[in-house]
Amino acid sequence: MNSKVKDFWQKYEYKIVLAVGFVLVAVVSFEGGILKGQKLSQNPVIIEKSIENAVPIENNINSAVQGVSQSQNLPTEVKNKDCALVGSKNSNKYHLPTCRYAKSIKPENRVCFSSEDDAKSKGYLPDKNCIK
């Protein structure tokens, strides 16, 4: 029995040592990664939105009673009654005013259209996400 083990070891010594070496390197690398990951763990990012521009409901009622136009507090696309569709100077797409993409257009870049024909005549295309 002893000679069989000795013969097996002499025949496969290189392969056994290589396999054990790979396993040890893998285990050490894995443990090192776990330890490094625990050290680098960060707190989650919290985004807080300020409410500086928020207008309390009481102020809206008081301003209406005092004769101040309520349209001062409305978004730009609602102020303009001819604005059935909204586009951007930086894009060739037009959207419904209620579409989330239309709401993200900066007021200085906003282009209003009275109809789809008006938008198409100026080279704009319908946005597939807003207009079906």
Image (cartoon, rainbow, N blue to C red):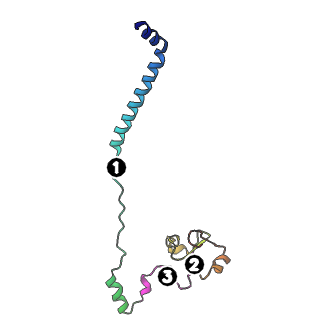
- Residues drawn in magenta: 69-86
Q: Which residue is mark 2?
A: 85
The x and y percentages for residue 97 are: 52, 77
- Provide the secondary structure element on which disc 2 rests: strand
Kindly identify the residue that appears in the image at 37 percent across and 90 percent down: 64
Q: Could you say which quadrant of the image residue 28 lies in?
A: top left
The x and y percentages for residue 102 are: 52, 73
- Quarter of the picture containing the N terminus is top left
Q: Which residue is mark 3?
A: 78
Above or below, comparing residue 37 to residue 94 in the picture:
above
Q: Are marks 3 and 1 in contact (CB under 8 Å)?
A: no
Amino acid type shown at disc 3: Val
Residue 40 is a magenta residue: no
Amino acid type shown at disc 2: Leu
Residue 73 is a magenta residue: yes
Q: Viewed as shown, does residue 30 lie left or right of 91?
A: left
Mark carried by residue 29: none
Kindly identify the residue that appears in the image at 33 percent across and 82 percent down: 57
Q: Which comes before the other along the chain, label 2 or label 3?
A: 3
Q: Residue furthest top?
A: 3
Amino acid type shown at disc 1: Gln
The x and y percentages for residue 39 are: 33, 42
- Provide the secondary structure element on which disc 3 rests: helix
Whole-number angstrom distance, CA of label 3 to CA of label 1 = 43 Å
For label 3, the crowd category at 10 Å Cα-Cα, with few meaning under 14, some 14 to 19 and many 20 or more, is some
Whole-number angstrom distance, CA of label 2 to CA of label 3 = 11 Å
For label 1, the crowd category at 10 Å Cα-Cα, with few meaning under 14, some 14 to 19 and many 20 or more, is few
Q: Are marks 1 and 2 in contact (CB under 8 Å)?
A: no
Mark carried by residue 42: 1
Q: Could you say which quadrant of the image residue 92 lies in?
A: bottom right
The x and y percentages for residue 9 are: 44, 12
